[in-house]
Amino acid sequence: MPQSLLLARRLVEAGVRVVTLNYSKWDWHGGTNAEGRANNSIFLREREDFPVFDQCVSALVDDLHERGLADDCSVVIMGEFGRTPRISAQVGRDHWPNVNCAILAGGGMRTGQVIGATDRIAGEAISRPVRFGELFATLYHNLGIDVNRSTITDLTGRPQYLVEDNGQPMAELV
């Protein structure tokens, strides 16, 4: 992980516009022991990996600020789905499309805020739900791409907009 973030920063310094990293251990589930009971080994992995991940991301964001690259580089930490609010005996936390989270930094965005809220168990959004289209529109905006004008031609020759559901950049960030 640390080497990947260092390489990402070097690529940004060299002028690369988009860098994608994969922290491959994110699709974690608990597990079961020989008796079929949940062993929740997920918590052991979290204790090992999260401090390293936290330190690496903090160092990357600090480094981008120190080198004057923060406004030109958006950092996005997210997955494609959330996790169930309750731990099950079979799989730990399963995939949960109702609520997810993302961390955004840099990109000239107004950061340092929490946007949206969930109920007390993080099962459902209760205020300001953010849609993926809004997140993607924000990232396109940071790249200087207008999602209202830019299209991609599909295989049938029809223009398709870059984001679904008329997603617009998040007003809280731009």
Image (cartoon, rainbow, N blue to C red):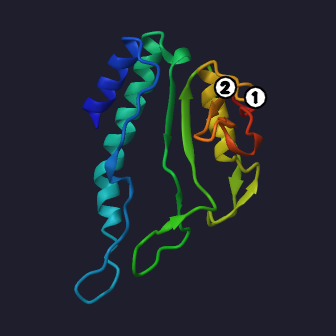
Residue depicted at 47% across the width and 69% down the height: 94
Circle 2 Cα neighbour tier, 10 Å, few/some/many (<14 / 14–19 / ≥20)? few
Badge 1: residue crowd in 10 Å (few <14, some 14–19, many ≥20): few
Can you give x and y, in whole percent of width and height, for residue 123 in the image?
Answer: 63, 66
Q: Is residue 21 above or below residue 27?
A: above
Identify which residue is drawn at 48% across, 49% down. Answer: 79
Residue 90 seen? yes
- In percent of width and height, residue 57 lies at 40, 33
Please indicate, yes or no, whether residue 112 appears anywhere in the rendered image.
Answer: no
Residue placed under numbered mark 2 in the picture: 110
- Viewer-side residue, 40 vs 12: 12
**134, 155: nearer the viewer:** 155
Position in image of residue 150 (x %, y %): 68, 26
Give the quarter of the image for residue 28: bottom left
Q: Looking at this view, name the residue that lies furthest to the front.
A: 156
Based on the displayed image, in which of its 4 quarters is residue 13 positioned? top left
Task: Give whichever of discs 1 and 2 has the lower sequence position.
Answer: 2
Tell me the amino acid under the disc marked 2: Arg
How far is disc 1 from disc 2 in space, using C-alphas?
22 Å
Q: Is residue 147 left or right of residue 44?
A: right
Give the amino acid at mark 1: Asn
Q: Looking at the image, which residue is at 60% across and 30% down?
A: 139
In the displayed structure image, the side of residue 81 where residue 121 appears, left or right: right
* Residue at 32 percent of width and 74 percent of height: 31
**Would you say the residues marked 1 and 2 are in contact, meaning their CB atoms lie under 8 Å apart?**
no
**Quarter in which the C terminus is drawn:** top right
Q: Which residue is mark 1?
A: 148
Q: Secondary structure at mark 1?
A: loop
Which secondary structure, mark 2?
Answer: loop
Q: Is residue 153 left or right of residue 79?
A: right
Residue 33: assigned label: none
